[in-house]
Image (spheres, grey):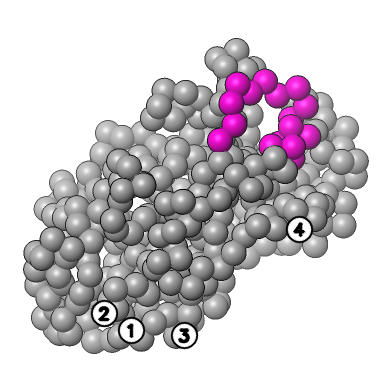
Amino acid sequence: MGTAVTRYLAQAGMATAVIGPDEPANWQTHPGVFASHYDQGRITRRLSKDPVWSQLAINAIAQYRYLEQQSGIPFYTPSGGLYVAAPHMDNGYLAQVETIGRRCFQVAYEALDTPELAERFPFLAFPPNCTAVYEPDPAGYINPRDLIRAQLAVAQQHGAAIIRETAVHITPGPPFTITTDTGRTIESEKVVIAAGAFSNCHGLLARPLALRVKTETIILAELPDTEATRLADMPTVIFQIEDPALDSIYLLPPIRYPDGRVYLKMGCNTRADQYLPDLEAMRNWMIRGNSDVILAEMKQALQTMMPGLQATSWHSKRCLITYTASGYPYVDQVADGVFVATGGNGSAAKSSDAIGKLAADLVFHDAWVSDIERSFFTAVYA
């Protein structure tokens, strides 16, 4: 969200700087905060049970190719996306997608019965009588690291400054004085706080927002090249599973990571998840949290979904999800000259460009100019 705000404000001609540390080279010794984009694959799709999230995704996806062309950084793969709900887990999804997806937004999709599902995706296995919906291109996945690089590259083309430090204090304004962890000070007429799970930290906001930060565990299954080739045409997968330990599985196709290896990534809610109360708890989780405690059950779930999967190693990784009281991001003005864009609710990577544009427009115009109702994004305080 923050890099999208930066890009849109810079393109609008405002003198803009973005303050935030780069991805730490060594998490164990990193003294600061963590961001949400340290990853190679996030699902993108237009279908949703919620028309607001559908509209945000549609608006963001429309910018992907432009960003790639302007920055020269590819980050988007339209692999298609599969949604599957186990029996009794559907909750009216198919009816809602018909109303919201096809009728409101003209999103193409296919409803698949059990035999069609097995024939179309023979490398996947689900219980009988599942609800299954396949959304073709432009559904797929984005590389969040490269999306951020693309946003920053275009922002720099329009004069934005990138300051790889952490904001630790804001002196009230306007004009505001932002102090970083190195002691540097930056003056600004307006400030946007887009710090994700860490938005309430360091006292940057006069009133803390109603945010809940949850631990999230993912696993990476390392694949040999032959297995990656076999699964090359795999779509992204969301599976509403019936399981006491796991909930809401999401799965990415084989993706090459910075270490040169190819992994399948799977994440989900788990029985081991916790809500974290403060900066120290968030840092402890990211640096030394026991994500392996649920590794065996997540590994079993993936092997059940993909019988015969050939993986050479398994790894767990940790991240954070930031929930708001409304279920939508907070995009709002919270004081004179102070704005927020935060709270992804586990759904914002794909739509971050559109969310950032909402915030940038609010900053630039000092008014809400979007066709999407402003009340969805109103900040709620703790």
The residue beneath circle 3 is: 382
Q: Earlier in the sequence, mark 2 or mark 4?
A: 4
Q: For the magenta stretch, what is the residue range? A: 299-315
Classify residue 94 as left or right of residue 88: left
The residue beneath circle 1 is: 334
The residue beneath circle 2 is: 338
How packed mark 3 is, by other alpha carbons closer than 10 Å (few <14, some 14-19, many 20 or more), is few
Quarter location, residue 280 = bottom left
Q: Residue at x 66, y 47 (%)?
A: 294
Q: Earlier in the sequence, mark 3 or mark 4?
A: 4
Q: In whole angstroms, how far apart are the C-alphas of marks 1 and 2? A: 6 Å
Q: Between residues 108 and 115, which one lies in front from this camera angle? A: 115
> Considering the image in quadrants, where does the N terminus appear?
bottom left
Q: Is residue 146 above or below residue 160?
A: above
Name the amino acid type tagged 2.
Answer: Val
Q: In whole angstroms, how far apart are the C-alphas of marks 3 and 1? A: 13 Å
Q: In whole angstroms, how far apart are the C-alphas of marks 3 and 2? A: 17 Å
Residue 74: say if magenta: no
Residue 308: say if magenta: yes
Quarter location, residue 52 = bottom right
User: Which element is circle 3 on?
Assistant: loop
Is disc 1 in contact with disc 2, using a CB cutoff of under 8 Å?
A: yes
Residue 352, disc: none
Name the amino acid type tagged 3.
Answer: Ala
How packed mark 4 is, by other alpha carbons closer than 10 Å (few <14, some 14-19, many 20 or more), is some
Query: Where residue 49 sits: x, y (%)?
Result: 67, 62
The residue beneath circle 4 is: 93
User: Which element is circle 4 on?
Assistant: helix
